[in-house]
Amino acid sequence: MELFFVLFGSMLPFLIILFFILLSSIKQVNQYERGVKFTFGKYSGLMDPGWRLLLPIVQTWRKIDLRTRVVDVPEQETITKDNIAVKISAVIYYKVVAADRAVLAVEDYNYAIYQLAQVTMRNIIGEVEMDELLSKRDEISAKIKDIVEKTTDIWGVEVENVALKDIILPENMVRTIAKQAESEREKRAVIIKAEGEKIAADNLVEAAKKLSSVPGAMHLRTLSTLNDLSSDDSNTVIFALPLEVLRAFESYNHKVASEIVKKK
């Protein structure tokens, strides 16, 4: 018994060191992660979620997050195809689908995607005109995504979406666009008003034809109008007669006066 305690006491430091080495060799991989393992510096496989054991010194590993990442592409100043300077920013959504390639194929896939998105965005904006940039944002975003995805696929990264966030135009261009929009609205208003007047004129012509085709209809319409006017005491009705009618009365009066003189 004494010999056992002597041996245990002599081995205790070694056992403590062995325990800490074993404890440090246990690695935890979360459900949303994968571990890339290297043995003697060579890739030796992926580590699935759970507790995994690595040989000290011999083996190393790198943890890769598989969740979707959202990265803001900062404001970029570029020139469109029609030589208009614009400032544009975007947001990119991506995730790692092959942890081994994300480690082996590129040094820092996050930084690489960040730079690639900036360059691609400037190049694509330079190929379109300003009107197309404002009206086809979804198509331009999809085009940027396709170009970025072709490169990131080699890195084991999937680009889920690229969205243009802000498009800032020069102040003079904003005023020009506002004037153009105002002119368009005025143009539509004039066209609508002209179409309304045309329809009203057609209806008036149709009404005049119906009134003239029925005897007494025009007289009834006149009486109806007078009745509407008489409902308000403040209205003053003025009848306008053609000059020919007044001249006819004048000639009639002269004729009557001549006859009277003759009889006398």
Image (cartoon, rainbow, N blue to C red):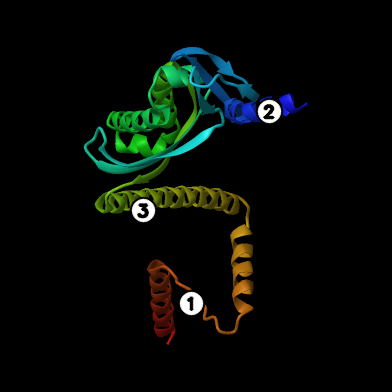
Residue 15 seen = no
Query: In the image, what residue occupies the spot 49% across and 51% down?
Result: 196
Tell which residue pokes out farthest to the right in this image.
1
Q: Which mark, by number, is residue 119?
A: none
Residue position marked by numbered label 2 in the rendering: 6
Q: Which mark, by number, is residue 182?
A: 3
Check if mark 1's residue and mark 2's residue have beta carbons within 8 Å.
no
Check if mark 2's residue and mark 3's residue have beta carbons within 8 Å.
no
Camera-nearest label, 1 or 2: 2
Tell which residue pokes out farthest to the front in this image.
2
What separation in Å lies between label 3 and label 1 (alpha carbons)? 42 Å
Amino acid under disc 2: Val
Amino acid under disc 1: Ile
Q: Nearer the viewer, residue 79 or 5?
A: 5
Residue position marked by numbered label 1 in the rendering: 238
Task: Classify mark 3: residues with Cα within 10 Å, few (<14), some (14-19) or many (20+).
Answer: few
Amino acid under disc 3: Glu
Task: Classify mark 2: residues with Cα within 10 Å, few (<14), some (14-19) or many (20+).
Answer: few
Query: In the image, what residue occupies the spot 44% across and 70% down?
Result: 241
Task: Classify mark 1: residues with Cα within 10 Å, few (<14), some (14-19) or many (20+).
Answer: few
Query: In the image, what residue occupies the spot 52% across and 53% down?
Result: 204
Q: Quadrant of the C terminus?
A: bottom left
Q: Tell which circle, 2 or 3, labels the residue nearer the N-terminal end.
A: 2
What separation in Å lies between label 2 and label 3 (alpha carbons)? 98 Å
Query: In the image, what residue occupies the spot 38% across and 53% down?
Result: 186
